[in-house]
Image: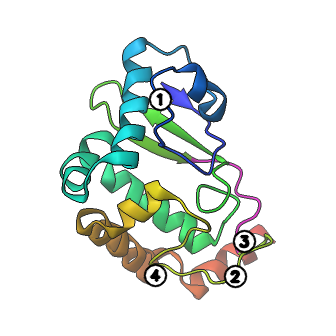
Amino acid sequence: AIFKPSTSELFTDWGTDWATYNQAYDPKTELTDAQKQRVMALGKLVSSATDAEFAATIGSFVDLDSFARYSAVLVWLANHDSLLQNGQNFYTYLHPTTNRMHFIAWDQDFSFGNVRNNGGLSIHDPWSGNNRFLSRLYKLEAFRSKYLARMTEFSERLFVPERFAQQVGEIG
């Protein structure tokens, strides 16, 4: 199942009727009832699980390693025209074997702070507004440690000034 969400309320419980979710999640593939139920169950988990339930269960719904890498790249690119602000410009993919959600970047033209309302960017809470999914996830040590490890890795290996200068020179 592939989705192209456009909602700042990603993974929110909007009830048990898929029609309520369909436009916000914009499926790009035909969905089975089980796939629809899985997305709705994730919304219910994010919206109403206790902190302990959320911590124990979220890793079975979202691939935390993959999401940590995706999040670290978004934050490094300072792209708020994404899940970090308006809930768009990405795809989600429900893996058919693991049944866990993966995230795929798309449309990164507002990267490097090239967007309005980009003040106050922090690596510890890089989103704008009230995003329950992100705020709950970033509080979890299981996610936060993976995310900060990716931020460190990228700081030391990928996003270094010399590398950028070299790439810009090659492109020029």
| Quarter assignment of residue 161 | bottom right
Identify the residue at image location x=28%, y=65%.
140
Main SS of the magenta segment?
Answer: loop
Numbered range of the magenta stretch: 105-112
**Mark 1 or 2, which is nearer the eye?**
1
Residue nearest the viewer, comparing 160 with 69: 69
Q: Secondary structure at mark 1?
A: loop
Q: Is residue 106 found inside the magenta-colored segment of the image?
A: yes
Q: Is residue 170 left or right of residue 22?
A: right
The tag on residue 15 is: 1
- Residue at the image point whose x is 78% and y is 72% from the top: 114
Mark 4, residue position: 155
Q: CA distance from mark 3 to mark 4?
A: 21 Å
Q: Earlier in the sequence, mark 2 or mark 4?
A: 2
Mark 1 and mark 3 lie on one chain; the one further toward the N terminus is: 1
Q: Which residue was labeled with disc 2? A: 119
Identify the mark nearer the N-term, 3 or 2.
2
Residue 141 seen anywhere in this rendered image of the structure:
yes
Give the CA separation, mark 2 to mark 4. Answer: 21 Å
The amino acid type, in three-letter code, at marker 2 is Gly
Q: Residue 171: x, y in percent? A: 76, 68
Q: Is residue 117 above or below residue 131?
A: below
Q: Quick check: is 91 in the magenta stretch? A: no
Q: Amino acid at mark 4?
A: Ser
x%, y% of residue 146? 30, 66
Amino acid type, mark 1: Gly
Q: Is residue 148 left or right of residue 22?
A: left
Separation of marks 1 and 4 at Cα, in angstroms? 41 Å
Which residue is tagged 3?
Answer: 170
